[in-house]
Image: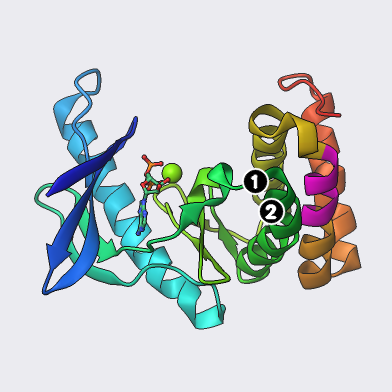
Amino acid sequence: MKLIKKGAEADIYQITWQDFRAILKIRKTKNYRNPSLDSKIRKQRTIKESQIISQVKSFGIPTPLVYFVNLENSSIIMQEIPGKPIHDLSESKIIHLSKIIGKLVGMLHKNGIMHGDLTTSNFILYKNTVYVIDFGLSQNTIKPEDHAVDLRLIKEILNSAHAKIMESAWKNFLLGYKSIVGSANYVKITKLVSDIESRGRYAQVV
Ligand SMILES: Nc1ncnc2c1ncn2[C@@H]1O[C@H](COP(=O)(O)OP(=O)(O)O)[C@@H](O)[C@H]1O
Ligand SMILES: [Mg+2]
C-alpha cells in the first residue's frame, strides 16, 4: 500500500485489489468537527461519491469503477486511472482538452448533476479519454444557480492555476459546454456566472 496523495479531506493510496491496481480513498477524521457530525459528513460524502461516480456512467461520463465501499472507515476502493491529471499537462494540451472538459460538464448538468469541485486535478487523461473523479461534493440538482457555481469554480481555477492560457482555455470550455446544453441554457447559466461575479463576493475573472 503506497500513499500517493495526502489531501485536505482524504488520503489516497495505490493498492492491489484482486490483482488489479486500484486506488483506496479514505476520508480522514477532522478533529475540529464535533465527532458525531464528522462521522456523519464523512459517511455522507463517501456514499454520494460512490453513488454518483457510478450513476454518471449511464450517460457517458468516463469514471473509475467502484470496487468496494466501506462506511466503517469512510473509504472507497476504485479502479486506478493510470493517466495524468489535466492540471499537470502542457499548456497547449490543456487548451485543447478544455473543450472536452466543457462537454463533460455540460453532460453532467444536462443530466441534473452538479460536480461541486471542478478543478483541473479532478480530470484525468488516459489513452485519449478524459475521466472525471472526486464526486464527494456532487449533488443531484437541476437548478441553474447550482450549475453556475460549478462554472464559476472551474473559471476561477483556470484563472489561478493556468493564468497564461486562461482566455483560450475558458473560450474552449464554453464552446464545449454550449454544444451540449444548448444556447438557451448556456445564456441563462453564463448570465448567472456574471451575476455571482458582480455580487462582489468574488472578484471578476478577466
Ligand atoms: N481513481 C483514480 N485513479 C488515478 N488517480 C486518482 C484516482 N483517484 C484519485 N486519484 C489521484 O489522487 C488525487 C486526489 O484524489 P481526489 O479524489 O481528487 O481527492 P481530493 O478530495 O483530495 O481532491 C487526484 O487528483 C488524482 O491525482
Ligand atoms: Mg480532487
Kind of residue indicated by mark 2: Lys
Which residue is disc 2 drawn over? 93
Q: Residues within 10 Å of mark 2 (few under 14, many from 20)?
A: few
Q: Provide the secondary structure element on which disc 2 rests.
A: helix
Q: Considering depth in this image, is 44 or 26 the residue closer to the camera?
A: 26
Answer yes or no: is residue 29 visible. yes
Viewport quadrant of the C terminus: top right
Residue range (magenta): 167-173
Kind of residue indicated by mark 1: Ser
Q: Residues within 10 Å of mark 1 (few under 14, many from 20)?
A: few
Residue 82 horizontal/vertical position (percent)? 38, 61
Q: Which mark is residue 101?
A: none
Which residue is disc 1 drawn over? 90
Q: Considering depth in this image, is 5 or 137 the residue closer to the camera?
A: 5
Instruction: Give the side of residue 177 with respect to residue 115, left or right.
Output: right
Residue 106 horizontal/vertical position (percent)? 70, 64
> Does the segment drawn in magenta span residue 172?
yes
The structure residue drawn at horizontal position 21% and vertical position 35%, both measured from the top left corner, is: 28
